[in-house]
Image (cartoon, helix red, strand yellow):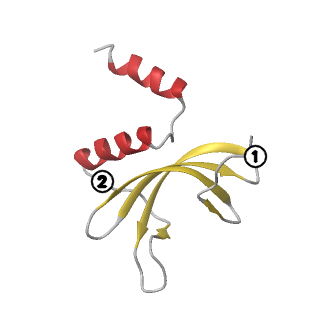
Amino acid sequence: MARKVIKDTKYCQILNQGKVTDEDYTYSIEKIFIKAIKRDEIRFSLYKDTIKTAERYIPRSLDVTEKQLLQLIKESINAGVFSKEFIKNLSQILNKK
């Protein structure tokens, strides 16, 4: 079964995205396929609308508030970025408190 690709670049294919947007940036957690090593990975990304293009990738660290991070994780889970196994393991870790 072929996977749906949101965006294809030289480096990777973006497969799923959870996004949160504010007045300046779009924050994203993405499932990507790295072409050179043929492996799925999770990427935390930052995008900014520019004159040339909407949601231009900004190669820098992703700095968000705890509230934004919670929203971003929720959106990413709903968008299918994380596997069911990952969510199950995360749930187990969170419930050990």
Q: Residue placed at 30% from the left, 45% from the top? A: 71
Q: Measured from the top left, where is residue 11 in percent x and y?
A: 68, 61
Q: Residue placed at 29% from the left, 70% from the top? A: 24
Q: Residue placed at 23% from the left, 46% from the top? A: 67
Q: Toward the viewer: 13 or 1? A: 1
What residue type is disc 2 on? Val
Above or below for 76 versus 11: above
Q: Measured from the top left, where is residue 78 in percent x and y?
A: 42, 40
What residue type is disc 1 on? Lys
The residue carrying mark 1 is 38
58 left or right of 25 in image = right
In the rendered image, which quarter is residue 28 located in?
bottom left
Q: CA distance from mark 2 to mark 1?
A: 30 Å
The residue carrying mark 2 is 64
Q: Furthest-bottom residue in view?
A: 51
Above or below for 38 versus 57: above
**Quarter of the picture holding the C terminus:** top left
Above or below for 58 versus 67: below
Secondary structure of the residue carrying tag 1 is: loop
Q: Measured from the top left, where is residue 60 in percent x and y?
A: 45, 64
72 left or right of 43 in image = left
Secondary structure of the residue carrying tag 2 is: loop
